[in-house]
Structures are given as structure tokens and as C-alpha cells.
Amino acid sequence: MLKDGILDPQGEAVKNALNSLGYNQVNSIRQGKVLEINLDETSKEKAIKIIEKMCEKLLANTVVENYEIEII
Amino acid sequence: MHAAIIIFPGSNCDRDMLSALRLAGHETTVIWHKETELPNNIDLIAIPGGFSFGDYLRCGAIAAKSPIFCEVRRHINRGGYALGICNGFQILTEAGILPGILQQNIDTKFISKVIDLRIKNTTSKFTYRYSTESKISIPIAHHEGNYFAREDDLKKLHDNNCIAFEYINNPNGSSHNIAGILSENHRVLGMMPHPERHVEKAHGCQDGYPFFEGLLHIS
């Protein structure tokens, strides 16, 4: 997800489209990405650590993005 | 001068870059991104525009992790010159070599047109052929050209005279009208506009020529 305060023109365009469909209760939209990762690792703790590294190295650009990891 | 042009799947301005560098008198070598070595006598690395790896994940993010990039980083770390234009600029920021990031244009549209630039730094090897009074016309063609950097990074860019080019009429929402920036040692330049598209008579404008010609004297 884009960090707070970072302009999100795509989210804004989607919000405007929903408003024009009559959903006037939509005040703002922030658009992000979801990546489903199938990992060869049985330990949850290890899996989170590995994915954290992946986020820092490639998956997120922490200049403007935050990331959250969820095991499902 | 010997320039290496790095090509990724999806690069599409590599031939323009090659042609501009040759026109100015540079010797050129083309390097595929899977290579793990650069020739020894390289003076300049040029990363061209395009849509490397289809802009998947984020523009430039995957190219910045490609095998040749260890060598690119080594060249830069020992004080070598490097140039990234358009997608090349995005790759240099994703690699962490230049600060900030290029985000989607503020109006979410792809912009392809000729814009005017002001030269902010006229001492770097990339820009010394221009004067601060110069206004140059250079094409832009991008969807993610909206330069963003943290306040402390922007301050550093100003303090170290690292802002090379500024838009006269900001087309994409870039912070501080930034169109191109230099590394702290002024030897790495990233810019969104395409000087290689304004070098020949047939281009109708040759404002980009002094940029490539000036680079002949980097070593």
C-alpha cells in the first residue's frame, strides 16, 4: 500500500468513477497490490522472515509503500 | 569515450541512445542484462528507455535486480559515469543509486510531447555545455514520470546542486518540477526527458546534442 500522504492518482480516479455511479458515500480510495506467495517453508516465523526480506529487497519500494504480511 | 548500453527485455530506446552516442563520437558496446561482466575500458554506462520487464511490479524494479546490475553498481561505486533516461531513470531509483521514485503522472495519463527544460546544474559532465539561461526543448514519453522524494532527500538534492533539469511547465506532478537529478558526485544522471530524440537535423531540433557531445570529455 502507498504510505499515508503519498498521492494516489489511480485510487482517486477509481473513487471518481464510483462517485459517478452514484456511490457518493465513497470519500477516498487507496489502491494497493496483493501478492499471493506459495512458499516452500513449514515454519510460520521463518516464512514471515523470508517474505519480509523479499519485501525489502524487491516487492515493496519503501520510499512510498508500506507492506503487510499475512499467513493464510 | 566508450559507452556500454544495457538492454533489458522491453527496452525500446536503446537504438536511439546508441545512435545519439555514436553521432557524438562515442564508441559503443551493447550489453544484454544477463551478462555478468562489462568490458574493462567502459567510461559510461547508458540505461535506455522502454518498458523493461513489461513494467511488472513497479517500473524498473525487476531490471534493477538483473545479473548485470552488480557490475553497474561496481562501476558506479568506483566513480564511473552512468546515465539513465526515462525507464533508465526509474531503474536507477529502484536500484537505490539515485534517491526517490517515479510515480504515475498526476493526471494518470501517458504523456508524449515536447516540453521545455531549464538547466539547473551547468557544471556536471552531462550539462556543462548548456548555460543556466538555456531553455531546451526535449521530448517526454512516460506514464510514470512524477518524481517523488522524501523532504530530506529533496533538501540534499538542492544543497548538493544535484538537480540537473527542471520542467518549465510541470507536466506530470513532479516534486519541485524535477525532470532530472544527479548523484552526489555528479557522475550519475537520471532524467525522464529523452535528449537522444533531439540530436539529429532530421529530428527538427538538436537541443539534446550538446548533452552527448559534452560526455566525450569524461575521462
Image (cartoon, coloured by chain):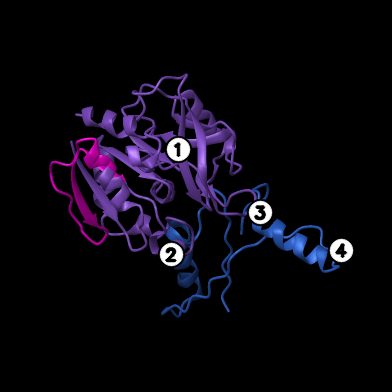
Residue sitting at 25 percent across and 45 percent down?
B74
Does A58 sit above or below residue B74?
below
Foreground mark, 3 or 1, reads: 1
Label 1: element kind: strand
Question: Which color is chain A depicted in?
Answer: blue
Q: Which mark is residue A25?
A: 4
Q: Which residue is disc 1 drawn over?
A: B138
Badge 2 and badge 1 in a common chain: yes
Foreground mark, 1 or 4, reads: 1
Q: Which mark is residue B33?
A: none
Q: CA distance from mark 3 to mark 2?
A: 21 Å
Q: Which residue is disc 3 drawn over?
A: A9
Give the chain letter at badge 1: B
Q: Which residue is disc 2 drawn over?
A: B54
Badge 4 and badge 3 in a common chain: yes
The type of residue carrying mark 3 is Pro
